[in-house]
Image (cartoon, rainbow, N blue to C red):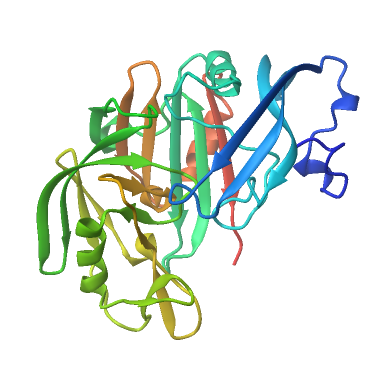
Amino acid sequence: MDANSFPDLLYELAINTTESKTFKSLEIPFANNYTLPWNVKESAIYGTVATDKLSLKKLEFEARFGLVNKIRGEPTEGIYGQLGVGRVGFSRNNQSATALRDSILAAIGTKVLCLSAETTDDGKLRSTLVSLGKVPFPSPDLILKTKSQDNVGDLWQLNVTSIQTGSYFSKIAIPAAFSTALNGIAGPERVVLPLVKALNAKYDKNRKEYIFPCLQEINPIFLGLNGAVVKLDRHSFSEPVNENDCQAKFSITSENRIILGSSIFLNRGFCFDFGYEEISVYKTKRNSHRIIQKNAAKDANSIVFVEKFKH
């Protein structure tokens, strides 16, 4: 976000290019749309491509990026309502007009991105973790390692091979891609509606959400990811909207693909290896983010960001 175009933004939420001696606008226009169901809300950005020397904790590198001077909606709003200075795409797509992702990965050397989130005992978000470089999770905690599927858009994608909740079980083979900008799970009717039925949720036309009583017992959902089973507890696919009602974080899409939103990272770790185009899933232990952050401070091959949430 360009501070000259958004003077009302807080200092830490925009870039003041006049303060940089190395900033250069390439005068190349760029635009991007963030659409449903891959994002929580629809938005769009417009601007120009630029270059500058950037720093990311212990890294310093030159990068090419999009400087935004016009927006529609709230493109930098995170899934939990927090605002950021911008967005960095980490799909496998190499056709972007900007190359910030590639500059970051080249600077760190080991081209691996890992994501994780921790909750409290009552399901409230405690912290999120973004790791670049060396995999921060112990090897014995590995659940799955698999090649990402080729697909349109070069998204990180694998197969969902089974779905189970309560007495419902379905053995399927449907591609599933990841989106950190979605808070929930999206998919075709044949995937979503049985889960809605298992929750006894009803569609609220005004809210455009599936609603069910918060006090009712809820079975976890077990997803088979290329054969390896991961458990999603109620906090991964539901959240309260008021004292009595909870929202099932499911949405229906027209394409034959599941979208796994950021809640899939709750209490586990996912790593995306750009060198080998592999997806890895790890078990995580309580308070692992704090330990990982401490270890990364001593490791030249790792950069770790941990954001803590207070309730």
Q: Is residue 134 above or below residue 121?
A: above
In the image shown, does 271 or 207 lie closer to the viewer?
207
- Picture quadrant where residue 219 is located: bottom left
Q: How many marks?
A: 0
Q: Is residue 54 above or below residue 33?
A: above
- Give the percent coordinates (x, y) of residue 119: 45, 58
- Give the percent coordinates (x, y) of residue 254: 31, 51
Q: Is residue 238 above or below residue 173?
A: below
- Give the percent coordinates (x, y) of residue 308: 59, 52
Q: Is residue 59 visible?
A: no
On the rendered structure, is 193 left or right of 98?
A: left
On the rendered structure, is 112 left or right of 171?
A: right
Q: Quadrant of the C terminus?
A: bottom right
Q: Is residue 208 visible?
A: yes
Which residue occupies 45% across, 53% down? 118
- Give the percent coordinates (x, y) of residue 154: 38, 27
Which residue occupies 35% across, 84% down? 215
- Picture quadrant where residue 19 is located: top right
Q: Quadrant of the N terminus?
A: top right
Which residue occupies 51% across, 27% down? 132
